[in-house]
Amino acid sequence: MKAAFEILGIPTAHWVTMGENPPDMSMWLEAFAAKFDPDSSIQAFGRAEFDQLLGHWGATTDQPAALFAEELVQAYPEAKVVLVERDIDRWYKSYSECVIDGANNPFIPLATKIDRRIIGRMGELTDLIVKYCFNVHEPRARGLMNNPEFFSQWRANAKRTYLEHNKMVKQVTPKDRLLTFKLEDGWEPLCRFLGKPVPEVPFPRVNETEAVKEKISLYVMQSYKRGAVNFAKQAIPVVIAIVAAAIWWNYRGG
């Protein structure tokens, strides 16, 4: 859907774009605290806050925005809502292989600790999404190892969560603002709903599983690179100081 919207000239936010701007992740963490933490002093997000977070986009797809569907529908009464409904078994196979398997990357736990600013925040947001959307309260990692029970519960709750989410979107969205859309329907109903001309290209078919896994691997690899650079920046002055001290000691002894 992100690819389809962008062909139509609508810049679209998605989970994979979140890590490209760390302040966005900080705001999403505030949004979660405001909605789910009863002890938080942060006020619930309304249009002003969502404008700051999403105002430079024309549409938003995927998480974490999906967890704020009701708030976004209320904050933007002029916005149209496209609810993509898929066969539950086909959706689950894709979601399990794409998102859950991607999050089960064994290099992520260490990456979240050595790069807290980006991959660390993405990991924190993923944990909150799984906790509050999929009702999984197991820790994602135990030390530097992924926790199998976390992923097992995530898979077990996925189908029910998907169906409940679709039901909720239909309940909170006025019918004249909602398009229930199937990917196999192609451009016609989508363009008619959005008031856009039908493009002269096929409706996009993206291998999202491979694309998301590749993006996650890229984020992890970049986190290790940043960690190595930061370590070098901290270590070099220490090495220089040690070498200088050794030279001074030898000179003094001589």
Image (tube, rainbow, N blue to C red):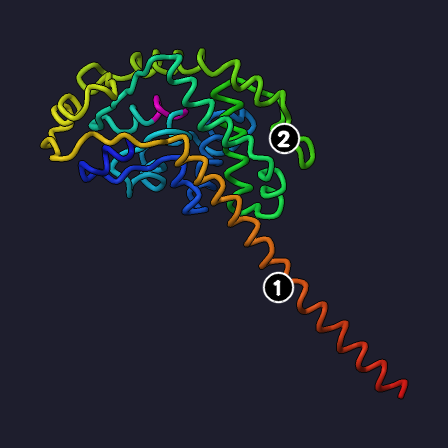
Where is residue 59? Give x, y as percent.
Answer: 27, 34
Query: Upstream in the sequence, badge 2 or badge 1?
Result: 2
Q: Which residues are magenta?
A: 67-71
Q: How would you rate the neighbour count of disc 2 (Cα within 10 Å): few for under 14, some for 14-19, many for 20 or more? A: some
Q: Nearer the viewer, residue 106 or 70?
A: 106
Q: Which residue is mark 2?
A: 146
Where is residue 201? Give x, y as percent.
Answer: 15, 35
Q: How would you rate the neighbour count of disc 1 (Cα within 10 Å): few for under 14, some for 14-19, many for 20 or more? A: few
Alpha carbon distance from label 2 to label 1: 29 Å
Q: Is residue 42 left or right of residue 174?
A: right
Q: Is residue 1 left or right of residue 15?
A: left
Q: Amino acid at mark 2?
A: Asn
Q: Quadrant of residue 243?
A: bottom right
Q: Is residue 133 magenta?
A: no
Residue at 40 percent across and 38 percent down: it is: 16
Q: Is residue 60 left or right of residue 197?
A: right
Image quarter of the N terminus: top left
Where is residue 152? Give x, y as percent.
Answer: 58, 18
Residue at 77 percent across and 72 percent down: it is: 242
